[in-house]
Structure formats: structure tokens, C-alpha cells
Image: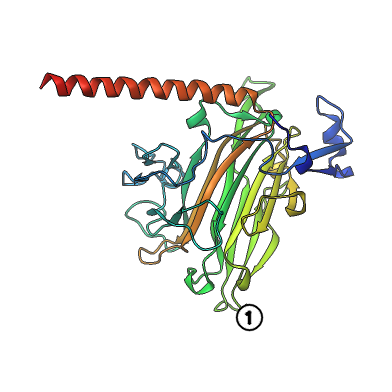
Amino acid sequence: MKYALSRYVALGITAFFAADVLALDYSLTATAVPVPGSGAKIDFLGDTFEEDGWKFYHNHPKSSREEDGRARGPLAFSGNKRMQEGPERGQPDLLEVIKTPPNGLPESNHALLIRTLHSGVPGTYSRTVQQDDLICGITTRLGSQIPVREIPSCVVRIWLPPAEKWENRSGPHFGIRVGVRTTKLEPNRGFFASGSSSVVEPYWPGMWIHFRSETSRGVESDSALIKVRGDHRGIDFPVKNISADQFGWWTLGMSLSPDGQIHYFARQGVDDLTSQDHLTSQFPYSFRAERLNSFFFNSCNLNDGTTWSTPFVIDDPSVYVVNSTRVMQLVQKREAYELRRQQKRSAYRTYQSRSR
């Protein structure tokens, strides 16, 4: 396997992080920022949407555990099991494979259109901005999380429609995010309790695409911007402006380095990301990521029962790993297992047909 070290950029650790660096198990004066797309592409993860008959089984009503505590099963999923509903917020209402919009990836014929209408709790309308989730499973597909020491990253191409096609609302419209885990100490509870225990803490860094509508007060013309979630306090902050004439295909990616930082990248068009596309590196919520669990997308709209979300299109959501030996071994085992299942199902169908 080739390590794409030429696609790394050295980023010095500032004095702000100096104390944290000393706490690591290894000594560093600088940390390598892996460019998303470095290392081996894990074809077993992600999706190209080129499969004949691609279909998503919605299994309504949606899950809405984050809002009302109800994870309504069975969760929705694509027929190839690569994409699935999120248990916290449910899946977008429209997931349709379409012809790739112009100027997409050279060998791409199809991409995925994502829109939602009934976000939020099924059957209710909050008339506030709500979101649905589409999960590109990693742990669910692989049977394992990916530790940051293996240097994973996620990349997606996303098509921003012309300004007149956006939901006419200033604010967040689409999210590109990762599910990660860390471990933190929490004080033991109870009247006689003392000391502390380690607990697993999930969190979901990412990038949000915001729209700035010319119909909003103080906005002269339609545009968009990318906000990162988030800084060391977990607060979103802007990193890149996108004018209306730049709408179309963009490439966005996030990588994780062994020190637990999240690195954010974006560039116009569909070319591979480079070190020049680095936007920022952060320890969101002051956490150090330990394991990558998922790669997912948020579709947002005004939850009023009539307003559709902006029609975004994604293509080739992908997962890469630099130190990929362990992951590739897991992939081989999972593929062998799936092949055995298919053979057993085929043999059973043959037996039934002959028994009639």
C-alpha cells in the first residue's frame, strides 16, 4: 500500500495547544495534517450510486429519538445496505438516484438527490428548522470503528443548485459530518461515591452549508458559506464564503489525525483535495477524537409540512485510511461472510423451486 505522504501538510502546534501536546503518549513539535483522500480508499464503505436498481426503503414513520425519545424501527436503509436512516432524527423524504449533474466526476453517470419535507417528529410541525440524517455506515458495515491512529478520512462531492432553487431561508441547509468517539472522566455519582470513571462520549463534528438569501434583511445578493462545527467550545464558525456564481460541484472532506484533531477541507469542483484546500483544524468541544464511527449528511428545512428542503446532490461519499492493513483484513472477512450468505440463500431458493 502506498502512503500518500505527498498529500500531507505540516501544521505547527501553537502555544495554545502546547500543554495538550505534552500530555500525549508521544512527543511532537508539529503534527501532520492528513489531506482527506490520503491512503487507501475502502471500497467496501461509501457508495458510488452506479448500482443498477439502487433503491432506498424508507420504513416510515421516521425515527426521532433526539426530539421525543422514540427510535421507530426498523430503521430505513438502501438495498445495498451502504446508506441508512439515523436513529436520532430519521432519513430525508426523497432519496433518488439521478443522472450526474454537469461537470461531475469524469466516470460518474449517477449521483444521489437528497431532499426532505417532513423533518422533525412525524405528524407534527414545529415551524422551526429541523433536520434529517442519512448515514454512510462505517461501524455498521465494517463491524468495527476506525481508531485515529490509523488516520481515517472522509470525502464527498456535493452539487449546490442555482440560487433560485434553494429554500428561501437564510441559515443552515445541509451538513457533512462524522460521528466520532472519545473517552472522558466523569465523577462517580452517589452519596458515598468518590473518584471518577471513564465514559465514552460521542460527538459529531462537521461542516454546514448556509444560505444567505437576498430576501433577508441586510443581504444584498444570494450567496452561501461554510461553517465548521465547531471550535474548542463547540461553537460553529464561518470558514469560507461561496458566491452564487460559484454554485455547482464542490469537494468537501474531513480527516482525523493521531492527536485527535479534526481537519476540514473544501475546494470548488470535483478534483481531489490538496493541502491548499485546508480550512481549519480543531479539537471540537475540547475533545480528542479516538475512533471514527460514521460519515453522514443532514438535510434541513422549515418544518411546516409544505416547504421542501434545497435539492442537493451528493456523489461518491468515500472513506480512506492511511494505515489500512487492519481495515482491509476486516473487509476481506466481511466480504467472505456476505458471499457465504448469498450462496446459502441461492441454494435455498434452488431447493424450494425443485421441491414444488
Front one among 188 and 204: 204
Q: Amino acid at mark 1?
A: Glu
Residue depicted at x 51% and y 53%: 314
Hey, which residue is sitting farthest front in the picture?
Answer: 107
Q: Quadrant of the C terminus?
A: top left
x, y (%) of residue 15? 89, 43
Height in image: 121 above or below 217?
A: above
Label 1 sits on residue:
220
Q: Is residue 155 left or right of residue 87?
A: right
x, y (%) of residue 19? 86, 35
Q: Is residue 162 left or right of residue 207?
A: left
Front one among 112 and 77: 112
Height in image: 50 above or below 192?
A: below
Front one among 302 and 104: 104
Residue depicted at x 63% and y 19%: 192
Height in image: 150 above or below 336?
A: below
Residue 318 can be seen in this image:
yes
Residue depicted at x 71% and y 32%: 2
